[in-house]
Image (cartoon, helix red, strand yellow):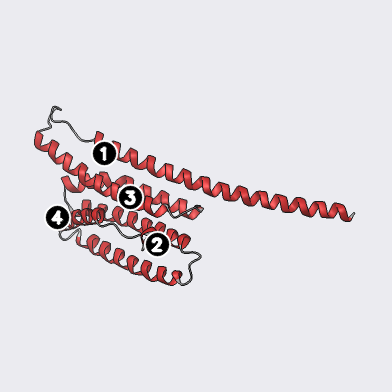
């Protein structure tokens, strides 16, 4: 009787250990799938952007229109490439992903997918509505990236004493800066759309050449 109870307890422990291993393996596989999904979606975005550039030999397309489309493509390319660079640097510190993390990443990809289209609209017709819509998509993408960055910081500094306080202060400052800048630009979009368009172009170039520091950069220091 006692032997049977011991066998049952041992079996339960084995089952629990196996379930834990399966959960850990599943989390690691989800992380790999998420990385592949991000790369695939962003690659498709860049491909579609190139295919939408009209050639000068097409009917009604002048060389000036062609060069204008090339400029729009380069602006969109820098925006998407910068987001991809930041996202991959942040995901490097994650060994597993949660459902919340996956949902956040999906919202990020959705916002990023419409940015090239809105960039084209904003560049060809810099009206208040066009710049406003671009600002909303740009803000959502940045906000989701910030949430992903927060998850990466928490994962990376989970076992470092005193780091949560440092993480919270840095994240809080970053969140305030992102909110203030984006809200100001979105508000001004209807008043001075061309100036806000120029501000977004400057932000794009600045963020590409001076990306924000991630947990990896802090650890290296």
Q: Which residue is mark 1?
A: 49
State how many labels appear. Answer: 4
Give the camera-side residue of 153 and 195.
153
| Residue corresponding to mark 2 | 219
Residue at image point 23% right, 64% down = 184
Q: Is residue 203 left or right of residue 6?
A: left
- How far is the residue under mark 4 from the one under mark 3? 28 Å
- Badge 4 local density, few (<14 within 10 Å), some, or many (20+)? some
Label 3: state its secondary structure: helix
Foreground tag (4 vs 1): 1
175 left or right, relative to 186: right
| Location of residue 61 (image quadrant) | top left
How busy is the neighbourhood of tag 3: few (under 14 within 10 Å), some, or many (20 plus)? Answer: few
Question: Which residue in the structure is indicated by mark 4?
Answer: 194
Residue 189 vs 85, above or below: the answer is below
| Camera-nearest residue between 58 and 160 | 160
């Amino acid at each position: 009787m006692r032997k049977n109870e011991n066998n049952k307890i041992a079996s339960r422990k084995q089952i629990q250990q196996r379930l834990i291993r399966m959960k850990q393996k599943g989390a690691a596989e989800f992380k790999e799938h998420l990385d592949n999904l991000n790369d695939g979606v962003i690659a498709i975005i860049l491909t579609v952007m190139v295919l939408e550039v009209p050639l000068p030999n097409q009917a009604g397309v002048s060389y000036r229109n062609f060069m204008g489309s090339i400029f729009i493509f380069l602006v969109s390319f820098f925006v998407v490439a910068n987001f991809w660079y930041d996202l991959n640097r942040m995901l490097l510190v994650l060994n597993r992903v949660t459902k919340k993390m996956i949902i956040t990443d999906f919202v990020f990809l959705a916002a990023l997918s419409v940015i090239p289209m809105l960039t084209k609209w904003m560049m060809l017709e810099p009206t208040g509505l066009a710049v406003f819509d671009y600002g909303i998509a740009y803000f959502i993408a940045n906000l989701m990236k910030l949430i992903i960055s927060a998850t990466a910081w928490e994962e990376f500094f989970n076992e470092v004493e005193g780091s949560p306080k440092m993480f919270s202060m840095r994240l809080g400052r970053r969140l305030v800066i992102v909110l203030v800048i984006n809200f100001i630009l979105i508000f001004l979009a209807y008043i001075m759309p061309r100036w806000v368009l120029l501000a977004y172009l400057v932000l794009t170039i600045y963020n590409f050449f001076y990306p924000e520091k991630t947990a990896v950069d802090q650890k290296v220091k």
